[in-house]
Image (tube, helix red, strand yellow):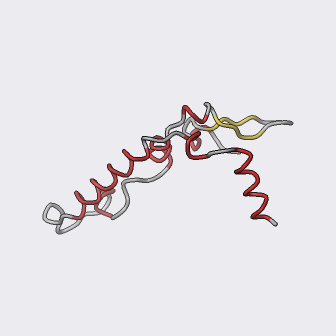
Amino acid sequence: MCDASSAAGFVETQRGRGGGLRLARPPSQINVGDVVRKLENTTGFVACMGGKEDCVIDGACGLKPALSGALNAFLAHLDQFDLAQITGSRSRFLQQLATEKA
């Protein structure tokens, strides 16, 4: 099962018969930008952004600010959506999954 730290508060687990995983909040209350921020490593597009490696041209190179701006724009765009908006119709989603298995 998924533990609380890896679920970042988006998922709850229940042990035992009838247990499993479920969303901790309604999909309309889960922001997609928040999910990406908490579950994805957004600092490691290039080594210099993660702060773990020294770069001899850091400060003179324009890649870090360019990628940082792109990342901020990406996350700001995702902030406009909640999980309910991107999942669409549950029945249509399940139907599509069933079609793909066949």
Q: Can you give x and y, in whole percent of width and height, for residue 30 in the image?
A: 54, 36
> Left or right: 58 with respect to 71?
left
Q: Which residue is found at the position 36% from the left and 45% from the top?
A: 76
> Left or right: 67 with respect to 97?
left
Q: Can you give x and y, in whole percent of width and height, for residue 67 in the image?
A: 29, 59
Q: Can you give x and y, in whole percent of width and height, for residue 18 in the image?
A: 84, 36
Q: Which residue reaches farthest bottom?
A: 56
Question: Residue 66's quadrant in the figure?
Answer: bottom left
Quadrant that contains the C terminus: bottom right
Q: Which residue reaches farthest right?
A: 17
> Left or right: 55 with respect to 78?
left
Is 4 drawn above or below residue 46 in the view shown? above
Q: Which residue is found at the position 76% from the left and 54% from the top?
A: 95
Foreground residue among 85 and 53: 85
Quadrant that contains the N terminus: top right
Q: Which residue reaches farthest left?
A: 60
Question: Residue 54's quadrant in the figure?
Answer: bottom left
Is 12 drawn above or below residue 63 in the view shown? above
Q: Which residue is found at the position 71% from the left and 40% from the top?
A: 21
Question: Residue 52's quadrant in the figure?
Answer: bottom left
Foreground residue among 10 and 17: 10
Foreground residue among 33 and 7: 33
Total residue callouts: 0
Foreground residue among 72 and 42: 72
Q: Can you give x and y, in whole percent of width and height, for residue 98 in the image?
A: 79, 58
> Left or right: 25 with respect to 69?
right
